Image (cartoon, helix red, strand yellow):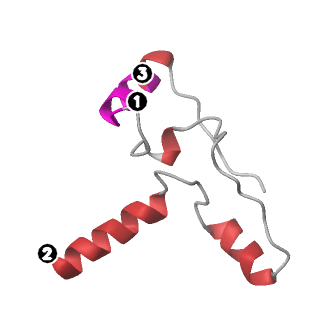
Amino acid sequence: MVEPIRELSKEARISRLEDAGFNFSLSSSDVFIDLLTDSAQGDEPSSVAALMSGDESYAGSSSFYRLETAVKDITG
């Protein structure tokens, strides 16, 4: 699987890490090389389709932020 990536400057990386408190609240879009995520793909067609459209990172994924927004909208 191939996806576009971007490399942030050293200063931007340090700033993002500090803003995230040096923990898993770092957004996955700010990670250039992910050594934490095991994104092995299954052999079922549905898992392949999910990989093609989803953010499979372990922490800070865009899908988490969409879920968080939906839960806050529902629960206040």
Question: Marks 1/3: CA distance?
Answer: 5 Å
Q: Distance between the residues labelled 2 and 3?
A: 33 Å
SS for tag 2?
Answer: loop
Q: Residue at image x 52%, y 27%? A: 8
Give percent across and percent down for residue 58: 56, 54
Q: Is mark 1 on a helix, strand or loop?
A: helix
Which residue type does callout 1 highlight? Leu
Q: In this view, does 54 lie to the left or right of 69?
A: right
Neighbour tally class for label 2: few under 14, some 14-19, many 20 plus, Cα within 10 Å: few
Could you tell whether 13 is left or right of 73 in the image?
A: right
Q: Which residue is drawn at 70% across and 67% down?
A: 52
The residue that disc 2 covers is 76
* Amino acid type, label 3: Ile
Above or below, 61 against 48 in this view is: above
The residue drawn where x is 42% and y is 21% is 14
| Amino acid under disc 2 | Gly
Label 3: few (<14), some or many (≥20) within 10 Å? few
Figure quadrant of residue 74:
bottom left
Point out which mark residue 8 bears.
none
Q: In this view, does 26 lie above or below 64?
A: above
- 55 vs 4: above or below: below
CA separation in Å, label 2 and label 1: 29 Å
Q: Name the residue under label 1.
A: 17
Task: Find the magenta span and give its range.
Answer: 13-21
Q: Residue 73, percent across and down?
A: 21, 76
Residue placed under numbered mark 3 in the picture: 14
The residue drawn where x is 61% and y is 60% is 56
Q: Which mark sits nearer the N-terminus, 2 or 1?
A: 1
The image position of residue 21, as x and y in percent, is: 33, 33
